[in-house]
Image (cartoon, rainbow, N blue to C red):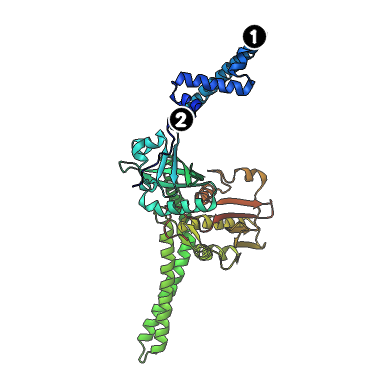
Amino acid sequence: MNRRTDKHPTAAGLSSDMRGLVQADPETRLHRQAEAILQEKTGYSSERLKSLSPEEQKELFHELHVHQIELELQNEELRQAQQALEVEKARYFDLYDLAPVSYFTVSKKDLIQQANLTAATLFGLPRRTLLTKLFSYFVLNEDLSLYYAFCKQLFESNKQQAIELRMLNNEGAQFWVYLEAITAQDVDGAPTLRITLSNITERIRLEQQDKAHLSELAHVTRLGLMGEMASGIAHEINQPLAAISGYTQASLNLINTENPDQAKLADILAKTQQQALRMGKVIHRMRKFIKSQPTRRSTAEVNPLIRNCIDLCVAEFKPNDIELTLELENNLPCFCVDAIQIEQVLINLIRNGVDSLRTLPAGQPRRLTIRSRLTPNNNIQIEVEDNGPGINEDQKQKILTPFYTTKADGTGMGLSISRSLIEAHEGAFHFDSAYGKGATFYFTLPIGKKDISAEGCC
């Protein structure tokens, strides 16, 4: 039977000197080690020390005393460095734990590895409990796909990223966070995420409140805009009504004959139906435009939206001898917008252009041009250009401010609200004008822009 062989030799297997060191008490062993180091550094053995003259002994003593002082100074420096390190360490943990934002270290498998006290307070859990959870456990179900896609992009790009999403604390209360993260490695070289969270619930609440107020204000101005367009819309409705009345009378006359022409009667009735449908579309567009409804973004095509606006404004062109030109780029990508609000902006710009052209002398050409195009940085741009009198320098400074108007019966809110609506869509609102040479108002909107509140966007 084989016996286990000890990995470490026993004292019996050592030399007599080594046995002495092993068996000696700690103080004796330390003393002997010091003697060995002294001999190594100075070349003096115990025997040689005994043979030294008094002068040599005094010199050696002085040298050793100097070494002792050097060691004491080094020890003091080390002690001070250690104290400073402890102070910095404590300060770091104070900054880390008591920071106004939540800090996390999360593994690639989504396990929370580290968290500060602010994070524990935010989620309403002791820190030791927090470290047993997956980070995604606290993400709202509706935003989980957004979070997973964010993490995937982080590990693939190795660049700092940020996102806004909704989370839940331990009691199930929902709140918004601004999450910033960057990839790192733990002590074993495994990939991790360094995450900071800022609670932005109040900011989101105020933004939503502002959007609701803007939506209400936009609805009021739409009602006013529709009131200004009432005569033109009445004309658009009266035309098909008059046609329907005429076609109906013709049908009655035809029916009262001895042998009514069935084909002719059918043709008259078909034309009657077309006029009724035409009138129905005008009324439908009008009702949809003035209806109060919550802001709701969805995918919209640019050029059909422009044509809808023209249909509502078409009655303004012919009576004012305005030549309308459309320069619409084909195959434009869709954008994610509240279509009614964008139509409101465009109709306001069209009507402003019409009002400007009305001031031109009779007989002078009046041209209104509407353009759509894709900008080099992939934004949709819509322009409304007129060849009216333009805007002077004083007006340029004030024209986008609330309650400023150049019209006798204007409210001064149209352009101001239009700019707010475009900026609420993450777009930009601009104008160019040279006095006496017309004006161009235009706005840009991002394509494919989607946020959590947007439904059905591309």
Q: Position of residue 267 (x, y in %)?
A: 42, 84
The residue that label 1 is drawn on is: 58
Q: Circle 2 sits in a helix, a strand or a loop, which is it?
A: helix
Which of 295 and 56 lies nearest the eye of the viewer? 56
Residue 101 appears in the picture as rendered:
yes
Q: Are marks 1 and 2 in contact (CB under 8 Å)?
A: no
User: Label 1 to label 2, Cα distance in Å?
Assistant: 52 Å
Looking at the image, the residue that sits furthest to the bottom is 259
Going by the numbered disc 2, the residue's amino acid type is Phe
> Looking at the image, which residue is at 44% across and 35% down?
9
**Sequence-wise, which precedes: disc 1 or disc 2?**
1
Going by the numbered disc 1, the residue's amino acid type is Lys
The image quadrant that residue 41 belongs to is: top right
**Label number found at residue 93:** 2
Q: Residues within 10 Å of mark 2 (few under 14, many from 20)?
A: few
Q: Circle 1 sits in a helix, a strand or a loop, which is it?
A: helix
The image quadrant that residue 237 belongs to is: bottom left
Looking at the image, the residue that sits furthest to the left is 171
Which of 338 and 223 lies nearest the eye of the viewer? 338
Q: Residues within 10 Å of mark 1 (few under 14, many from 20)?
A: few
Q: Position of residue 356 (x, y in %)?
A: 60, 55
Which of 302 and 8 lies nearest the eye of the viewer? 8
Q: Position of residue 410 (x, y in %)?
A: 53, 48
> Looking at the image, which residue is at 59% across and 57% down?
353
> Looking at the image, which residue is at 46% across and 70% down?
239
Q: Position of residue 355 (x, y in %)?
A: 58, 55
